[in-house]
């Protein structure tokens, strides 16, 4: 596992400590890794939506209904 040294602003450090104290996470590393996983998952969904928009803009039309697009988006988000 790669090891990094990072600095936090005081409010962010206080928030991280509060999460650990509340037993939500066992360490700052675990919490930061979880936040990064969430951000990566969100980015994957954003990229998918952008691709759909670009396809629609290029073709002028999409065969998918609003419901299909929403269902596919939720499936991607949940994993």
Image (cartoon, rainbow, N blue to C red):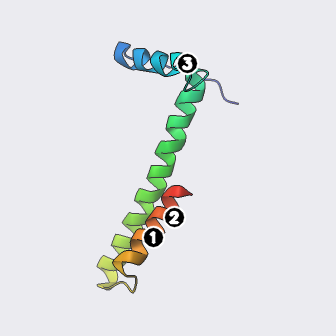
On the rendered structure, is 64 left or right of 35? Answer: left
**Residue ID for mark 3:** 5
Compared to 53, does 13 lie above or below?
above
On the rendered structure, is 73 left or right of 58? Answer: right
Residue 67 appears at what percent x and percent y? 38, 76
**Which residue is found at the position 34% from the left and 71% from the top?**
53
Compared to 71, does 61 lie above or below?
below
Q: How many labels does the image show?
A: 3
| Crowd band around label 3 with a 10 angstrom C-alpha radius: few (<14), some (14–19), many (20+) | few
Of the image marks 2 and 3, the number of the one nearer the N terminus? 3
Q: What element carries label 3?
A: loop
Q: What element carries label 1?
A: helix
Compared to 33, does 3 lie above or below?
above
Location of the N terminus by quadrant is top right
Mark 1 vs 2: CB contact within 8 A: yes
**Which residue is found at the position 44% from the left and 65% from the top?**
73
Location of the C terminus by quadrant is bottom right
**Which residue is found at the position 37% from the left and 64% from the top?**
50
Mark 2 vs 3: CB contact within 8 A: no
Which tag is nearer the camera, tag 2 or tag 3? Answer: 2
Mark 3 vs 1: CB contact within 8 A: no
| Crowd band around label 2 with a 10 angstrom C-alpha radius: few (<14), some (14–19), many (20+) | few
Toward the viewer: 64 or 7?
64
Residue 51 appears at what percent x and percent y? 41, 68
Residue 39 appears at what percent x and percent y? 46, 43
Residue 44 appears at what percent x and percent y? 48, 56
Distance between mark 2 and mark 3 Cα atoms: 35 Å
Distance between mark 1 and mark 2 Cα atoms: 6 Å
Q: Residue 71 carries which label?
A: 1
- In the orientation shown, which residue stands out farthest toward the front? 22
Q: Which mark is residue 75?
A: 2
């Amino acid at each position: 596992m790669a090891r990094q040294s990072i600095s936090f602003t005081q409010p962010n450090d206080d928030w991280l400590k509060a999460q650990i104290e509340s037993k939500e996470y066992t360490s700052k590393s675990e919490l930061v890794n979880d936040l990064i996983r969430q951000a990566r998952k969100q980015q994957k969904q954003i990229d998918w939506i952008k691709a759909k928009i670009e396809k629609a803009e290029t073709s002028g039309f999409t065969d998918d209904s609003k419901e299909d697009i929403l269902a596919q988006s939720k499936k991607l988000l949940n994993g």
